[in-house]
Image (cartoon, rainbow, N blue to C red):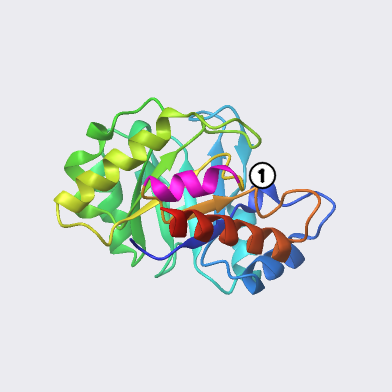
């Protein structure tokens, strides 16, 4: 399996904590990416992290950005976000009639294309673009809001996706999980084949522990489950 990457969700940084400080603490704790949710109020019923937020995040992040575009017609808006080589950019299969085109545009910008699917979207919706992506984002909750419960069937979906990718010779293609990535759920997600974990209010930014303490707890839980498996 691919190595474990943690991608802290900027949306979940506590309001009382300065974003720059939290980003730096997350990077010191070993974050591989910084996850930025972009919502347009149309694809999902929320508005979050506009273009200025992304620009400011780049000023404080030393690791690539992990842009999760929960927006309609992303192929028309990629130029808004200053996408850089090394970034990961997730485009939802449900958000465009031109998924292949949108992913190719991300690649042309030097970034890593990722196809995202909601809990109710079957793997078949992205099966024909798997050769074009470096990552698949499996939403484990319905997108739009933090603090939701895991949709249990998404674990089986991630496992089926891992099998499909491996059979196709795409072992290096990463599977990202986003939604209720808790200390309890993360080991199950790893067992299902996930290797990129979006960490939010139930993980890295969980009340009661520092970012470093929560990160160490998360990694220890995943590693323990791997040893037992």
| Pick the front one: 61 or 196 | 196
Q: Look at the image and say whether residue 190 sits in the magenta stretch.
A: yes
Magenta highlight on residue 203:
no
| Neighbourhood count class around disc 1 (C-alpha, 10 Å): few under 14, some 14–19, many 20 upward | many
| Image quadrant in which the N terminus is located | bottom left
How many numbered marks have been drawn onto this rendered protein structure?
A: 1
Task: Give the residue displayed 47% in from the left and 44% down from the top.
Answer: 188
Rendering coords of residue 83 (x, y %): 44, 62
The reply to whether residue 81 is visible in this rendering is no
Name the residue located 52 percent from the left edge and 32 percent from the top edge.
141
Nearer to the camera, 48 or 217: 217
- Can you say whether 63 is above or below 209 in the image? below
Q: Position of residue 20 (x, y in %)?
A: 73, 66
| In the image: residue 81, left or right of residue 107 | right
Q: Where is residue 191 drawn, in percent x and y?
A: 40, 48
The part of the image, by quadrant, that contains residue 179 is: top right
State left or right for residue 41 relative to residue 190: right
Residue reaching furthest to the left: 168
- Which segment did they paint magenta? 184-192
Label 1: which secondary element: loop
Q: Residue furthest front?
A: 228
Residue closest to the eye, 105 or 192: 192
Q: Is residue 5 visible?
A: yes
**Which residue does the numbered mark 1 point to in the structure image?**
202
Q: Main secondary structure of the magenta part?
A: helix
Q: Is residue 209 above or below residue 25?
A: above
| Image spot of residue 146 (x, y percent) | 64, 37
- Reply above or below: 166 against 140: below
């Amino acid at each position: 399996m691919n190595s474990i990457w943690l991608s802290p969700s900027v949306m979940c940084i506590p309001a009382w904590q300065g974003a720059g400080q939290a980003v730096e603490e997350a990077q010191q704790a070993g974050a591989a990416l910084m996850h930025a949710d972009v919502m347009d109020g149309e694809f999902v019923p929320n508005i979050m992290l506009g273009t200025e937020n992304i620009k400011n995040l780049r000023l404080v992040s030393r690791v690539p950005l992990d842009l999760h575009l929960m927006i309609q017609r992303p192929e028309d808006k990629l130029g808004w976000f200053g996408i850089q080589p090394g970034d990961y950019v997730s485009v939802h299969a449900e958000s465009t009639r031109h998924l292949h085109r949108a992913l190719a545009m991300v690649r042309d910008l030097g970034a890593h294309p990722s196809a995202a699917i909601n809990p109710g979207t079957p793997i078949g919706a992205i099966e024909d673009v798997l050769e074009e992506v470096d990552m698949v984002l499996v939403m484990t909750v319905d997108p739009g809001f933090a603090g939701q419960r895991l949709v249990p069937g998404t674990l089986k979906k991630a496992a089926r996706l891992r099998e499909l990718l491996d059979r196709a010779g795409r072992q290096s293609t990463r599977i990202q999980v986003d939604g209720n990535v808790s200390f309890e759920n993360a080991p199950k997600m790893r067992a299902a084949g996930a290797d990129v974990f979006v960490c939010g209010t139930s993980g890295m930014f969980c009340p009661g522990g520092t970012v470093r303490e929560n990160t160490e707890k998360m990694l220890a839980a995943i590693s323990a489950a791997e040893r037992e498996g």
